[in-house]
């Protein structure tokens, strides 16, 4: 029984391959387009893509060029080729601005950039680029039904940048690179003033500034303890009953003691 099933499956596979080769070798663009759409509709994207790629040339300048280009871009998207898909979605929207798919295509071009943006641990350049593209879509399509999704994606990318900024500063702190930590926490707090990490960042900035001052040469200590004291005041003014208020108060006393020496 198993041998029979294996033989049947093998025969079906060869038949399928033979059928696809027949489609590839066909010189009839209409037939290829029909079969390419069938492959796409059945999610057989690896077979659909070469056909649409070829048909892009066959139908260029014809009334069906838009249909072929739409499927071509969507097939790239379905295969997670987001960089290429983004380019072609945007190009479709620019080339065929009056097409029913133009607005969605413009959105998908920006959405692909969002999907291609890296995690918080990697270079944020693509994240900024994705935010710019989503904002451009919002600006150029103020009445689009895709605005909620675009705004949500921008907010998600902002959160990624915020988290990355915090993790960079915290990394300097944990590696005892206190000067770099203070600078990085200042950048993070300036760029992301409403961050849920704000209190922790302000506390770690106090701790980093104190350690930086304490480990400085004597001629620099007074100035750097004054900076640490400023960060203490900022923390206590913002979070007078914060979860780190006790630790900050302790550091404040240690700073005062060092200033009396």
Image (cartoon, helix red, strand yellow):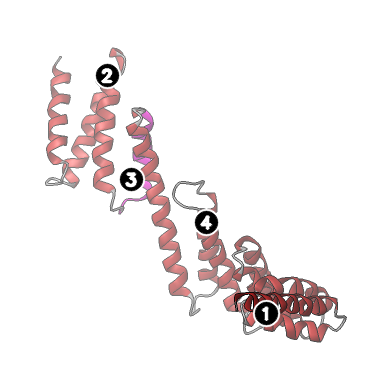
Which element carries disc 4, helix, strand or loop? loop
Report the residue marked by disc 2.
Answer: 221
Report the residue marked by disc 1.
Answer: 8
Q: Earlier in the sequence, mark 2 or mark 4?
A: 4
Q: Residue furthest right?
A: 27
Left-right relation of 103 to 24: left
Residue displayed at 15% across by 25% down: 254
Which element carries disc 1, helix, strand or loop? helix
Task: Reply yes or no: does residue 116 show up in magenta.
Answer: no
Q: Earlier in the sequence, mark 3 or mark 4?
A: 4
Which element carries disc 3, helix, strand or loop? helix
Mark 3 touching mark 1, by CB under 8 A? no
Residue 189, label in figure: 3
Report the residue marked by disc 4.
Answer: 117
Local crowd size for mark 4, using a 10 Å CA cut-off: few (<14), some (14–19), many (≥20): many
Q: Earlier in the sequence, mark 2 or mark 3?
A: 3
Q: Quadrant of the N terminus?
A: bottom right
The magenta-colored residue range is 179-194
Task: Reply yes or no: does residue 191 show up in magenta.
Answer: yes
Mark 1 touching mark 4, by CB under 8 A? no
Q: Earlier in the sequence, mark 1 or mark 4?
A: 1
Q: Nearer the viewer, mark 3 or mark 1?
A: 1
């Amino acid at each position: 029984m198993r041998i029979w099933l294996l033989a049947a499956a093998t025969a079906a596979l060869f038949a399928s391959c033979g059928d696809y080769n027949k489609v590839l070798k066909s010189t009839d663009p209409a037939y290829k387009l029909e079969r390419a759409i069938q492959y796409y509709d059945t999610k057989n994207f690896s077979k659909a893509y070469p056909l649409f790629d070829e048909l892009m040339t066959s139908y260029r300048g014809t009334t069906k060029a838009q249909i072929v280009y739409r499927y071509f871009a969507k097939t790239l998207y379905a295969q997670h080729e987001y960089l290429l898909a983004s380019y072609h979605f945007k190009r479709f929207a620019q080339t065929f601005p009056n097409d029913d798919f133009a607005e969605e295509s413009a959105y998908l071009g920006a959405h692909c950039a969002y999907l291609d943006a890296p995690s918080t641990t990697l270079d944020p350049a693509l994240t900024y680029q994705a935010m710019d593209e989503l904002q451009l879509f919002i600006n150029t399509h103020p009445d689009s039904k895709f605005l909620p999704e675009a705004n949500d994606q921008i907010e998600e990318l902002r959160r990624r940048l915020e988290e990355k900024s915090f993790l960079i500063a915290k990394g300097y702190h944990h590696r005892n690179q206190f000067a770099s930590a203070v600078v990085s926490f200042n950048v993070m707090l300036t760029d992301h003033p409403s961050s849920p990490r704000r209190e922790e960042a302000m506390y770690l900035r106090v701790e980093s500034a104190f350690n930086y001052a304490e480990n400085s040469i004597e001629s620099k200590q007074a100035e750097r303890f004054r900076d640490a004291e400023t960060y203490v005041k900022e923390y206590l003014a913002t979070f007078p009953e914060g979860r780190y208020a006790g630790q900050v108060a302790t550091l404040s006393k240690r700073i005062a003691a060092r200033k009396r020496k």
